[in-house]
Image: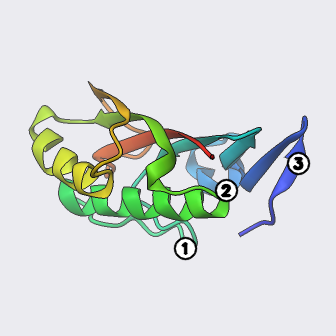
Amino acid sequence: MRDPITVGGHLRIRPFNTAESYPEQRLDNDLCQAVVAGDTVYLRGQVPQDLDTGENVGVGDAEAQAEQVMTNVATLLAEAGASAEHVVSCTVYLTDIRHREPVYRVLGRHLKGVYPVFTGLVVSALARPEWLVEVTVVAVRP
């Protein structure tokens, strides 16, 4: 994991280059997992991949993938000085509508009592074929 950096006056958490993350796709984009801009925390779409090892988790199991996604969300929010209670917006991308119930049960458990705005979309694919769910989050620190 790389140390956070500040660019444009905003803190960038876990910066990386896509050439390292997606070598098969021949990309070269400088990205990060989270940006803190003032009191707002923006998380990159979180997928069922361990943030430290890059290992895919729960291949073929939407519920297990959602658990890994929410583990990533909690980790990144903590690194940004926030927690689940600070989440204001959540967008869920599913590759199959049949994954909605198991994924939403997991997210609902992790966000119980938070009441964020929530949008769910079904998409034809995510960046890797084994990924069934991706979640983006916006949080506002007090």
Q: Which residue is mark 1?
A: 53
Above or below, comparing residue 16 to residue 52 in the picture: above
Using the numbered discs, state the Cα–Cα distance from disc 1 to disc 2 in whole angstroms.
20 Å
Above or below, comparing residue 18 to residue 4 in the picture: above
The outermost residue toward the bottom is 53
Using the numbered discs, state the Cα–Cα distance from disc 2 to disc 3 in whole angstroms.
13 Å
Q: Position of residue 27 (x, y in %)?
A: 68, 40
Q: Secondary structure at mark 1?
A: loop
Q: Tell me how the rendering is colored.
A: rainbow
Residue plotted at (88% across, 48% down): 6
Residue 99 visible in the shown view: yes
Q: Quadrant of residue 110?
A: bottom left
- N-terminal label among 2 and 3: 3
Q: Which residue is mark 2?
A: 80
Disc 3 packing (10 Å; few <14; some 14–19; many ≥20): few
Mark 2 residue type: Ala
Disc 1 packing (10 Å; few <14; some 14–19; many ≥20): few
Residue plotted at (33% across, 49% down): 131
Q: Nearer the viewer, residue 99 or 41?
A: 41
Image quadrant occupied by the N terminus: bottom right
Mark 1 residue type: Thr
Mark 3 residue type: Thr
11 sits left or right of 97 in the view: right
Q: Secondary structure at mark 2?
A: loop
Q: Nearer the viewer, residue 72 or 15?
A: 72
Residue plotted at (69% across, 48% down): 32
Residue plotted at (66% across, 42% down): 26
Q: Which residue is mark 3?
A: 6
Q: Secondary structure at mark 3?
A: strand
103 sits left or right of 50 in the view: left
Using the numbered discs, state the Cα–Cα distance from disc 3 to disc 1 in whole angstroms.
24 Å
Q: Position of residue 105 (x, y in %)?
A: 16, 51
